[in-house]
Image (cartoon, rainbow, N blue to C red):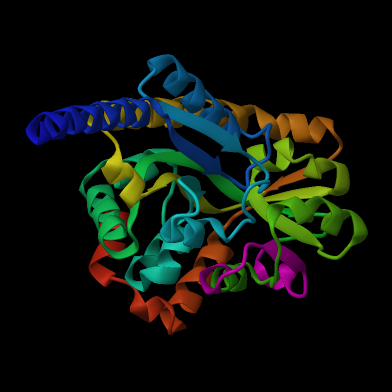
């Protein structure tokens, strides 16, 4: 009798475990993506496409996109990934350098010439090494690299700008972080750290005199309403990474990794094409809105960048071999 009861108890326990296992398997993995990009920007649109593709793949992933820092404040996403409080974010190379200083050269003004060089760097061996280092040292998996755009200077009041000296004293909104402040020095400005959601009002009230961003982001955020001038300094061709907490990535099934990786690469590629097309047209659109757009000789800015980085203790932490590889790519 005892044996029979034990067998029955074991069968019931096994059935309960089976039911619980099936229930757990049917529970979708939540993937919340936090980004500072406004809803109308190509980065957010790319992430929305990623969500759509994952929804259609039906692989047990529940993706939600949270633009304009509505879920996590800009600058707090990476620690949230590492603490296990967030699944995905759009991470920049500046955030990487805060924890892995030897990779700070990716934040150097005038490192890359154009989009094609960016793709050669991040789609080749340099990018492979970069992703491995980030995974090993930060516990973050880079799933795809997206083109954020080429950063330009935007001023609320017009001035004659030929070089960094002409921007002396200009309060320029920049993201927080030592490498951003160093980049600001190459432009000649006084950097003022502010999150993206605060920039429009800061420009409108004169809290800052300008900001620097890719023109497509400037356009999407409607900074043209509170600005008079664009100066085409082209000081940074910038990537942004679809980044995931590595423990979450490692816990996905092979099918989920394949679907998420494929959807991320597709979204990044589609977003790149849309942004490049927009960058080709946005100058005329901004001129049509009454802004002055000045194409300048950036040689003085490049010279300032060379001097400031060569004298910087921060830049001395960079991997010199990696820097040369990226510059020559």
User: Is 293 colored magenta in this rendering?
Assistant: no
- Determine the residue located farthest toward the top in the rendered image: 56
Residue 116 horizontal/vertical position (percent): 38, 38
Q: Which residues are magenta?
A: 162-180
- Between 50 and 152, the one lying in front of the other is 50
User: Is 165 colored magenta in this rendering?
Assistant: yes
Res. 279 image quadrant: top right
From this viewpoint, is residue 43 visible? no
Residue at the spot x=50%, y=29% of the render? 271
Residue at the spot x=55%, y=27% of the render? 48
From this viewpoint, is residue 311 visible? yes
Res. 163 image quadrant: bottom right
Residue 81 horizontal/vertical position (percent): 45, 55
Residue 289 horizontal/vertical position (percent): 84, 33
Residue at the spot x=57%, y=60% of the render? 76
Q: Is residue 96 left or right of residue 160?
A: left
């Amino acid at each position: 009798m005892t044996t029979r009861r034990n067998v029955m108890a074991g069968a019931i326990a096994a059935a309960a475990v089976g039911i619980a296992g099936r229930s757990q398997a049917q529970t979708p993995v939540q993937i919340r993506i936090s980004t500072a990009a406004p809803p109308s920007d190509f980065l957010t649109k790319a992430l929305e496409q990623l969500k759509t593709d994952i929804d259609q793949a039906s692989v047990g992933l529940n993706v939600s996109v949270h633009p304009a820092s509505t879920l996590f404040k800009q600058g707090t996403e990476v620690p949230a990934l590492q603490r296990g409080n967030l699944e995905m974010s759009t991470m920049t190379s500046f955030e990487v350098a805060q924890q892995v200083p030897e990779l700070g050269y990716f934040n150097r003004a005038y490192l890359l010439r154009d989009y094609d060089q960016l793709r050669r760097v991040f789609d080749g061996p340099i990018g492979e090494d970069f992703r491995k280092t980030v995974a090993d040292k930060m516990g973050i998996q880079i799933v795809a690299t997206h083109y954020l755009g080429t950063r330009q200077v935007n001023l609320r009041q017009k001035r004659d700008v030929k070089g960094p000296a002409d921007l002396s004293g200009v309060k320029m909104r920049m993201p927080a972080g030592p490498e951003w402040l160093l980049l600001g020095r190459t432009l000649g400005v006084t950097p003022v750290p502010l999150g993206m959601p605060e920039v429009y009002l800061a420009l409108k009230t004169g809290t800052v005199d300008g900001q620097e961003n890719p023109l497509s982001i400037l356009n999407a955020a409607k900074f043209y309403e509170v600005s008079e001038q664009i100066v085409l300094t082209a000081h940074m061709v910038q990537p942004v990474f679809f980044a995931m907490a590595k423990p979450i990535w490692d816990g996905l099934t092979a099918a989920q990794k394949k679907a998420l990786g494929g959807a991320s690469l597709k979204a990044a590629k589609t977003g790149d094409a849309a942004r490049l097309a927009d960058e080709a047209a946005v100058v005329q659109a901004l001129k049509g809105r009454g802004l002055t757009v000045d194409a300048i000789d950036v040689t003085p800015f490049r010279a300032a960048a060379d001097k400031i980085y060569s004298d910087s203790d921060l830049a001395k932490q960079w991997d010199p071999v990696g820097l040369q590889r990226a510059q020559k790519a």
